Each structure stands twice: as structure tokens, then as C-alpha cells.
Image (cartoon, helix red, strand yellow):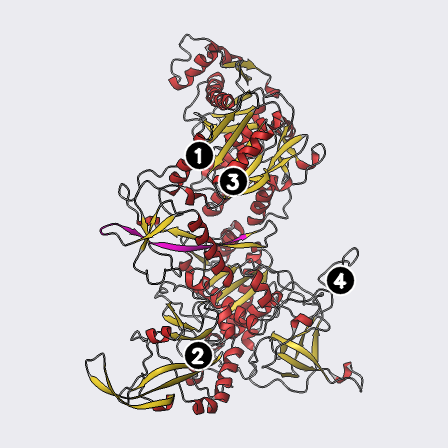
């Protein structure tokens, strides 16, 4: 209803009706009519709108809107109005006011016509300023914060660029009440990236610095995070020289690039105080985090608005920072960051819409008399050290700087007609960061030449809001053209690219965000189809007195091995954190296979010349039958019509439930029992099936990943087909990747490696181009807690050690070094950090190394044990180690610091032999389950005759009476002929590599005996 008769057409009068207002007052209705709303999609009509002359505000009925086929989505303090069920066509978006109402601006058709030019002007400046919100636009005008901005009228218009580039983000916590009192007293910094598409100069990240006092920002483009320190040095030198102030504090998160010893040392040397966030609390760096998001949203909006190819993202980011420095911010009172930093109002009369086609004057010296005077190009930014526009010339593929430009801001360049090619970009322009001295206040159509930016570069290793490139001399990004196919390829618009993959890899944070994208809507539908097909739930009436568990959507973009987007995956998960033990669930534990078991299976398959295969259960937890009575809400966005108050009763588990892992394990365990498998008493996730003379089938389970092998092809096929009948499965064929381990199977050997993960670790810690070393630790190096060196970055140190420990899954050659470094996780020193990085340098030189299992060898279990007496410098406790093989490469190993101090080397070796015996007995049980019973006693090779004598002598005498009783069970194992302790020479003791640092020659020799080889050196060569 409305009180403004001018808003209605086709009015029916004399209705003789009244309406009761919220205050209780009853007022007459003068008539009914049709409300016409002019939207971006055309005119929209709302029928039966009542005319109430006494009404001061316009009220729009949500129910009536829905009855007329409109769809309203409330969330994030706003309402979105759509004209179809797919939510594809947005009519209008209205922000909620302080009184919790949603005011919709409406006007007569005649007034719409009169305001058309004003609306265009407002929208033009909205786009020129990087899609700045209307509130800030009016603030710029009303407070006189800039020069050159005309009078603007507020008109509600939907901007497609904003819809595509800006998504809802939850609010950050309120910022600290403390603020810096002068420039550079505190600087906020953060790194954003990696971007899915490299910039035109090959950069993947941008580094942003924001001054706390003035909110002035500077941006740097980098290829690797390790360049952060170099950028900070340049930023410090530039800003301190320009402003006359010194940087006193630097606030950042705890990423490795900001916590390196070099970064810390530099800050300490120049007296800069570090302010670091608490782990997993990026909100404490809220200024930098919010600025990054604002910059990216503005850049995305500008790219979408003019459909600019995404390789220009760095130009858009630079322009966004340039514009934000000239826009109002809540942190400042009636001034822009530019004015707060320089003391002068910025001029913005020169601003044009990013990506607009334009005509650039060709200087007379560069053209003949009959040639065209201008050339058509595209605006990609603004010059800083020279007054001019940064222009991309599609014909020459160059970035140029020009002042003589005429723009067509309503135009759109047809990128699909352009051919891809090399783009000429500028040299690094770290000396051109001169933004504060510049103030483009007048239109730039003067008589001046055009500077050609024909020197290629990496996008500004350092720059302040300047375009990605500045100019010196020409060079091409691409190398030699020999043997390269230069067949022209058409450009794809950013909209086309975005339809196939999310370039920023920004996964939706809420259902509202996901629902705006068709691919995510399809992903949610696919998840619900899987749930329905699996009979996971049934819709029931709301029970009385039963706890109801909420559900939510979780979104994940799955990538291919090459980093491209494979698919968008939506998972409906229960809010299990609200469950109460004993009421909503009982047991939650579910076993998983040990790595030792997986490697034992792989080693045995290699010895027996069996192939290993892999299956993956789709949505495994949805198959687990629940014993408890569990009710969940209907999922957001998929509530059944006319059944809104009903709930789902779960027959099977959902992801997120506390009991879901246990329910899935009980289900799959029940299946194996019904299928005739025997569960191993030594490993709860190991199942074996024998079929008379047909052979044996072995299955190992790790949650939803299934590895299986056996001697009979028929058994293997029957198992796979039966599994695929019972569950939704993905047949992955031959085992090639499992738990982060790469598995290469050939006719002659099976090779385990972690090359891909090792490369990520090396790159993460900035050692991609480091000089490698031959041994992990130096033979003479001894580490202790208090070594007199300075404290190291504890967070970075723990990350390195954790990464190394994961690499030991296929690299026993670094087992001792990783175990040693793990002793100093608390208060590590620079010496510990140096050793840790030395291990990484060793990994860098052995990326393709792994364990080789040669096929056709006998499957006889053999063990090695050794110890380092008083190996710990801090408490002189023993370091023991063992390794086991089935005839070729080692498949089970350990390096352990014992909780006891030995009185002699014999006692130390005795304890080590006892540890090896414990592992040997378990491996014998597992091999027996595999059908490979070890009839003879397992030989364990020890290089200490006194320890062997102590183990074989059952009499407790004076020299052994103090040894803990748990180690004496080795004697029982020897008497039972399960273990045979055999002497070997020290030089042949393979386990020596697991207990101490060794010299180069000995380390390489024992590494070969372990079975750790390079993939390139294997017979037949293996590509990993």
C-alpha cells in the first residue's frame, strides 16, 4: 500500500474499504491500482496495491509479492528480489535500515524519465571509482573531500559488476580502539594469493601495506611469498623518505614469510616492533584482511564490468588501491587516505571507468601525414610519476602511457575478436613509487606525446598503486619461438572463464553466496540426490521432546593434479557440536590402517608379483546405519513446500555427526563379515579371504579408501563387482596414490615416493632454488636444548618438523633427523632451525627418491636393530632404531628416544633389540594373516655380541638386574624360536642410519641398503 497516488496506474476507486494499521488505527482505502517498478530487467508490475492517502510510508507485502511470482531472499541485513524460481534474474537488492525495515525507492514513470541522465551520471562515477558504494560517493561530494566531483542524486540501480564481483562477507570483529597518532607509527601487511591465473608478468600474489594512521595503502606484486622481505625493505625506504617519519611497528599474521629469521633479524636491526596475530586468528590483523578483501572485490567488479581477461588482474588490483586511497573510509573523519597522508585533497576529475575503450593520439612524429591520428586502445590504470593514463594497445600488445586520450565509457571491447599473444610489459619500477607527490586534477587531453611502455617486466616487484607495468625497453615475456606452436588462439571473456572455474578459488562461505552460482546449486542438488538414493533419511512430523540437530552446507572446490578445477563439491553436514554424549550418541571411535600395515601389504604384493588396486567409496558416511534416534532440520534452500515444520529422521549417518565414522566402520565391517572375509586380530581394518585352491584376497581399509590385492584375478573381479553393487564406488584401477604417497607399479618393481608433497614443502619454506646437500644432518653436529644461540621462530620450526615427519612415510633416510628435530619443538633455537633447513636442502636434492620393492624376491622377514648409547646431549638417554625387510626395500622402520639411561653400550643394544623384537612379533602376526606364516624364527641382526649374550642367557645376573622387566621378553621370544638374534658387522648394520648422524660415504652406502633409490636410477626408469 502507498499514500502516493502518482506511483499507481489503472486505479480503481470507490472501494469503500478500510485497513487496520500497526498502531491499531483504522484508515480508509481510496482505491487500488498497479505499481510499476522500472528495473534493470525492464518494467515490473505489482497488482492490487492499495492507495491509502494517510499513509506516509510505502509498504510492500511480502506475501503479495510471492503470490505474484516474485522470490524474496532475506539474509545479511538485506533482501534480494528475483523474478524467477532459479534466482537467476535479480530485480533489486534493498538494505535493511536501523528500524529493521527495507525501504524501496519508487517513482512515477515521468519522474523516471527526468532522472535518467542523473542516474547515468551517478552510475558513471560509481564505476569510475571502482564500483564504490553510494554512501561513500555521497560522502565524497557532501564533505568536499575531493576536487572535480559533480553533484550526484541518489537513485537505486542494480550494478551487474557489483553483483558478480562482490559477495557477502561476514563482519569482522570491531577494531581495536587504539589508533596510531602519526604516519608509519604502525603498518598493517598481508599477502593475498595465489591467483589461479598468473598476471601478464607471471606474478601470483600481491603484498599490501596499509598505514594505520592515514589508511594509505601500497601494493607490491610478487611471484613467491619469499619476496616479502625484499618488498618491505623497499617500502620502508620509500615511505620513510617521502613522509619524514620512521616505521615503528609492523602488524602481520603468522605466515612463514613474515616469521623467517631474516625478516625478524631485519626488524630487530632497524628497531621495528613486531605485532603478530594469535594462531588461526586472522581477524586480529583485521585492517589488512579487510583491505585485501575490499581491494579484491573492487578489482573483480571492474574486471566483470567490462569483461576484461583475467590476466589483467594485477592492473585491476593496482587501480583499486589507487582509487581506494582517494575514497572515504570509516576510519577517517571527512578526509581520504591520500589527504591524511599528504595533507592535500586529491583530484578525481581525470578518473574514467576501468577497461573503457579509448582513442589515443598518435604523436605526429610517429605517423605519416595520411595515417590515422589516433588508435583504439583500452584503459588499464593511471600513471604515477607522470600525469597520464595507462593504456593497453591490443594491436601491438603493449602497455603505453598517454595523456591525449578520449574515452568511450559506455563502450565494451570485443575481446573474443582478439588473438592471444605476447604482451610487452615494463621493467620493475621500484624507484617509481611517487604517488604522494602526484595529484591529477585536470582533464588529460593536453598536447603531449605518448610514451610507449616497451620494456618487459615482472609486474612491479615494488610499486604503489601504479599499474602493473612501467616503461623502459622492449623485450618479450616468452622465450625462443623454436618448436613452439604459435597457432592463434582466441581470448575468452572473464565471464566465460568464470563459468568454468573460480579464478580466485573463493569457495562460498554461506548458502546465500552459493545459491547465486548455478554450478554450486547443481552441486547441492547432486548431494541431496545421493542422500535420497541412499535412503539416508525420511521426512516425519516434528517429535515432542526430542533434540533437533541443525544442518549446514559446506563447499569445497576439488582440483585436478595440474591445479585446474575438477568440480564443485557441496556437502550437507550435521552440526554435530550440539550433540550430547549418552543422549545423541555413544561410541565414536573408528579404526584406520597403520602406515606400517599399508607398506607391508605393498611390499608383500611386490614380492609375490601381485598388482595392487584401489576403490573409493562415494559419500561413505552416508552408508552408516544409525543405532540412535536422530532428527535434523530440512536443509536451507531445499525446504519442502507446505511441509516447513516437518523434520528428517536419519536412518543413516550424515557427515558431521559424532557417530558417523563409527557407523560407517560398523557398516563396512558387517559387509566384509557377510562376504566371507576374516578380520585380522592384529589390524582392525585388514580383511583376508581365501577360497580353497583359488588363492587369497587381501583388503586394507582407510575410512573410504580401499586397497586390495591377491593371487587370483577372479577373486579380485568378484570383489570389485560386489562392492560396486552394495555401495556407490569409484574404481580407481591400479593403485597410484594413497594417503599422500605415490605408488608406481611396473613389471619389475613397485616404487613408493612423495615427490609432489616434497616439492610443496620446499617451495613453502622458500628453498626451491637452494643449494642441496648430501646428508641431512652433519655427522659432527650434536643438538641440545640450550646451545647458546638465539631463539628461532617456533611456528615455522614446528611446521618444518611436521612436514618432515610426514615425509618419513616413504623416506627412512630422514627418519633419524626428523626424530631428532622433534625433540626441540618447544623453544627451538637458530641452530635447530639451521639443522631443520639443512634437512630440507637434502630433500631438495633428492626429490625423486623413494623406496624400491623388487618383484619376485622371497617373502622372508628380516630385521636390523641398533642404538646410540647416551645419544641425547641433554639427558644421555638411548636412541634406538630398527628396520625390517621382506627381501628388497625396507617397509617398517623407527627411530626412538628411549625413556631410560643405559649403563653400557651392551645394555643400550639390548634395549634396542627388545624394541625390534616387539615390532617383529606384530609383523609376524600380520604376515600370518596375509597367508605368509613365518615358519622359522625371524632373524634380527645386531652388531653387539654382549647384547646377544644377554638376550640368550635366561639367568638374571648382576649386570642386568636393573633393566626394566618389559625388555626381558626378548628372551622368551628367542626360547620360543620366534626370534633369532644374529651378529652382524657394524659396517653392515643398516639400522645405524636410524640412530645417529653419519659421514657422507657411510650415509649414502646405508641409504642404498635401505632401498631408498632415485626413480631415475631404477631399472627401466620410473617417471614420478
- Which residue is labeled 1 in the image? 671
The quarter of the image holding the C terminus is top right
* Residue drawn at the location 53% of the way across and 33% of the way down: 719
Q: Residues within 10 Å of mark 3 (few under 14, many from 20)?
A: some
Question: Height in image: 284 above or below 106?
Answer: above
Q: What residue range appears in magenta? A: 544-558
- Looking at marks 1 and 3 on the same chain, the residue that comes earlier in the sequence is marked by 1
Measure the C-alpha gap from mark 2 to mark 1. Answer: 62 Å
Question: Which quadrant of the figure has residue 96?
Answer: bottom left
Q: Nearer the viewer, mark 2 or mark 1?
A: 1
Question: Which quadrant of the figure has residue 955?
Answer: top left
* Residue drawn at the location 56% of the way across and 28% of the way down: 891
- Looking at marks 4 and 3 on the same chain, the residue that comes earlier in the sequence is marked by 4
Q: Which mark is residue 724?
A: 3
Measure the C-alpha gap from mark 4 to mark 3. Answer: 45 Å
Question: Height in image: 849 above or below 655?
Answer: above
Measure the C-alpha gap from mark 4 to mark 2. Answer: 46 Å
Q: Secondary structure at mark 4?
A: loop
- Looking at marks 3 and 2 on the same chain, the residue that comes earlier in the sequence is marked by 2
Q: Is residue 739 left or right of residue 626?
A: right
- Looking at marks 1 and 4 on the same chain, the residue that comes earlier in the sequence is marked by 4
* Residue 30 picture location, percent across and down: 28, 90
Q: Nearer the viewer, mark 4 or mark 3?
A: 3
* Residue 444 picture location, percent across and down: 61, 84
Which residue is at the front of the view, 896 or 639?
639
Question: Which quadrant of the figure has residue 635?
Answer: bottom left
Which residue is at the front of the view, 535 or 363?
535
Measure the C-alpha gap from mark 3 to mark 2. Answer: 57 Å
- Which residue is labeled 4 in the image? 487
Q: Residue furthest left?
A: 24
Amino acid at each position: 500500500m502507498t499514500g502516493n497516488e502518482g506511483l499507481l496506474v489503472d486505479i480503481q476507486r470507490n472501494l469503500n474499504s478500510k485497513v487496520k494499521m500497526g498502531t491499531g488505527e483504522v484508515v480508509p482505502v481510496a482505491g487500488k491500482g498497479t505499481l510499476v517498478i522500472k528495473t534493470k530487467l525492464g518494467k515490473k508490475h505489482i497488482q492490487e496495491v492499495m492507495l491509502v492517502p494517510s499513509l506516509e510510508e510505502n509498504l510492500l507485502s511480502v506475501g503479495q509479492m510471492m503470490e505474484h511470482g516474485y522470490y524474496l531472499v532475506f539474509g545479511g541485513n538485506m533482501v534480494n528480489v528475483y523474478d524467477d524460481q532459479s534466482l537467476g534474474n535479480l530485480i533489486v537488492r534493498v538494505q535493511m535500515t536501523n528500524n529493521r525495515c527495507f525501504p524501496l525507492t519508487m517513482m512515477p514513470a515521468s519522474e523516471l524519465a527526468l532522472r535518467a541522465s542523473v542516474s547515468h551520471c551517478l552510475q558513471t562515477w560509481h564505476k569510475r571509482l571502482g564500483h564504490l558504494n553510494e554512501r561513500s560517493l555521497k560522502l565524497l561530494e557532501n564533505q568536499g573531500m575531493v576536487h572535480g566531483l559533480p553533484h550526484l542524486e541518489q537513485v537505486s540501480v542494480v550494478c551487474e559488476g557489483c553483483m558478480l564481483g562482490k559477495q557477502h562477507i561476514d563482519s569482522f570483529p570491531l577494531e581495536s580502539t587504539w589508533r596510531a597518532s602519526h604516519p608509519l607509527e604502525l603498518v598493517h601487511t598481508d599477502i593475498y594469493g595465489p591467483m589461479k591465473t598468473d598476471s601478464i608478468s607471471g606474478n601470483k600474489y600481491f603484498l599490501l601495506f596499509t598505514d594505520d594512521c592515514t589508511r594509505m595503502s601500497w601494493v607490491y606484486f610478487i611471484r613467491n611469498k619469499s619476496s616479502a622481505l625484499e618488498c618491505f625493505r623497499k617500502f620502508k625506504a620509500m615511505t620513510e623518505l617521502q613522509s619524514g617519519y620512521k616505521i615503528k611497528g609492523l602488524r602481520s599474521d603468522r605466515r612463514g614469510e613474515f616469521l623467517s629469521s631474516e625478516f625478524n633479524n631485519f626488524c630487530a636491526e632497524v628497531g621495528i616492533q613486531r605485532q603478530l596475530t594469535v594462531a588461526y586468528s586472522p581477524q586480529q590483523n583485521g585492517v589488512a584482511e579487510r583491505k585485501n578483501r575490499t581491494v579484491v572485490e573492487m578489482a573483480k567488479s571492474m574486471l566483470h564490468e567490462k569483461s576484461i581477461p583475467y590476466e589483467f588482474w594485477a592492473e585491476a588490483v593496482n587501480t583499486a588501491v589507487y582509487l581506494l586511497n582517494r575514497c572515504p573510509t570509516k576510519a577517517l573523519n571527512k578526509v581520504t587516505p591520500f589527504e591524511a597522508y599528504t595533507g592535500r585533497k586529491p583530484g578525481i576529475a581525470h578518473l574514467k571507468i576501468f577497461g573503457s575503450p579509448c582513442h589515443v593520439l598518435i604523436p605526429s612524429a610517429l605517423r605519416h601525414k595520411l595515417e590515422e591520428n589516433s588508435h583504439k586502445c583500452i584503459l588499464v590504470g593511471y600513471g604515477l610519476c607522470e600525469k597520464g593514463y595507462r593504456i593497453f594497445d591490443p594491436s601491438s600488445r603493449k602497455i603505453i602511457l598517454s595523456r591525449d586520450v578520449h574515452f568511450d565509457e559506455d563502450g565494451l571491447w570485443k575481446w573474443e575478436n582478439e588473438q592471444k599473444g605476447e604482451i610487452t610489459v615494463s621493467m620493475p619500477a621500484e624507484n617509481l613509487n611517487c604517488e604522494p607527490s602526484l595529484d591529477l586534477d585536470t582533464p588529460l587531453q593536453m598536447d603531449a606525446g605518448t610514451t610507449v611502455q616497451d620494456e618487459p617486466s615482472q609486474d612491479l616487484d615494488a610499486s604503489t598503486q601504479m599499474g602493473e607495468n612501467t616503461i623502459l625497453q622492449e623485450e618479450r615475456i616468452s622465450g625462443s619461438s623454436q618448436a613452439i606452436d604459435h597457432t592463434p588462439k582466441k581470448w575468452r571473456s572473464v565471464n566465460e572463464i568464470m563459468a568454468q572455474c573460480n579464478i580466485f578459488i573463493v569457495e562460498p562461505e554461506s548458502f546465500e553466496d552459493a545459491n547465486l552460482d548455478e554450478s554450486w546449486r547443481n552441486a547441492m542438488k547432486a548431494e541431496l540426490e545421493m542422500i535420497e538414493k541412499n535412503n539416508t533419511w525420511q521426512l516425519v512430523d516434528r517429535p515432542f521432546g526430542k533434540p533437533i540437530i541443525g544442518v549446514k552446507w559446506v563447499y569445497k572446490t576439488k582440483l585436478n593434479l595440474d591445479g585446474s578445477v575438477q568440480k564443485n563439491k557441496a556437502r550437507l553436514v550435521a552440526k554435530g557440536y550440539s550433540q550430547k554424549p549418552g543422549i545423541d550418541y555413544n561410541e565414536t571411535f573408528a579404526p584406520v590402517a597403520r602406515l606400517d600395515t599399508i607398506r607391508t601389504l605393498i611390499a608383500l604384493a611386490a614380492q609375490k608379483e601381485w598388482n595392487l588396486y584401489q576403490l573409493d567409496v562415494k559419500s561413505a558416511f552416508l552408508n552408516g546405519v544409525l543405532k540412535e534416534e536422530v532428527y535434523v532440520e530440512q536443509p536451507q534452500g531445499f525446504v519442502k513446500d507446505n511441509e516447513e515444520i516437518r523434520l528428517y529422521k536419519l536412518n543413516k549417518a550424515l557427515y558431521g555427526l559424532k557417530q558417523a565414522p563409527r557407523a560407517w566402520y560398523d557398516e563396512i565391517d558387517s559387509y566384509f563379515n557377510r562376504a566371507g572375509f576374516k578380520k585380522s586380530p592384529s589390524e582392525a581394518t585388514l580383511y583376508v579371504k581365501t577360497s580353497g585352491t583359488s588363492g587369497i584376497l587381501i583388503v586394507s581399509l582407510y575410512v573410504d579408501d580401499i586397497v586390495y590385492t591377491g593371487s587370483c584375478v577372479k577373486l579380485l573381479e568378484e570383489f570389485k563387482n560386489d562392492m560396486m553393487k552394495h555401495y556407490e564406488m569409484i574404481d580407481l584401477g591400479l593403485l597410484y596414490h594413497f594417503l599422500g604417497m605415490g605408488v608406481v607399479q611396473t613389471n619389475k618393481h613397485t616404487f613408493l615416493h612423495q615427490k609432489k608433497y616434497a616439492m610443496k614443502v620446499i617451495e613453502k619454506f622458500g628453498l626451491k632454488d637452494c643449494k642441496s646437500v648430501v646428508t641431512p644432518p652433519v655427522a659432527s653436529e650434536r643438538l641440545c636444548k640450550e646451545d647458546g644461540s638465539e631463539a628461532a621462530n617456533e611456528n615455522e620450526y614446528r611446521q618444518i618438523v611436521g612436514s618432515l615427519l610426514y615425509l618419513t612415510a616413504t623416506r627412512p633416510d630422514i627418519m633419524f633427523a626428523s626424530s631428532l628435530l622433534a625433540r626441540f619443538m618447544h623453544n627451538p633455537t637458530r641452530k635447530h632451525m639451521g639443522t631443520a633447513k639443512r634437512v630440507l636442502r637434502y630433500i631438495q636434492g633428492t626429490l625423486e627418491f623413494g623406496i624400491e620393492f623388487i618383484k619376485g624376491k622371497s617373502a622372508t622377514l628380516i630385521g636390523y636393530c641398533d642404538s646410540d648409547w647416551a645419544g641425547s646431549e641433554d639427558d644421555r638417554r638411548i636412541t634406538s632404531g630398527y628396520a625390517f625387510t621382506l627381501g628388497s626395500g625396507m617397509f617398517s622402520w623407527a627411530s626412538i628416544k628411549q625413556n631410560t639411561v643405559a649403563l653400557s653400550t651392551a645394555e643400550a643394544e639390548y634395549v634396542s633389540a627388545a624394541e625390534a623384537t616387539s615390532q617383529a612379533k606384530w609383523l609376524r602376526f600380520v604376515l600370518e594373516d596375509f597367508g605368509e606364516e613365518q615358519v622359522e624364527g625371524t632373524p634380527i641382526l645386531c652388531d653387539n655380541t654382549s647384547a646377544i649374550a644377554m638376550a640368550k642367557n635366561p639367568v638374571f645376573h648382576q649386570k642386568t638386574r636393573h633393566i626394566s622387566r618389559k625388555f626381558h621378553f626378548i628372551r622368551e621370544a628367542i626360547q620360543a624360536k620366534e626370534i633369532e638374534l644374529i651378529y652382524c658387522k657394524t659396517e653392515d648394520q643398516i639400522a645405524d642410519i636410524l640412530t645417529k648422524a653419519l659421514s657422507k660415504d657411510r650415509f649414502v652406502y646405508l641409504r642404498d641398503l635401505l632401498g631408498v633409490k632415485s626413480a631415475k636410477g631404477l631399472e627401466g626408469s620410473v617417471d614420478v
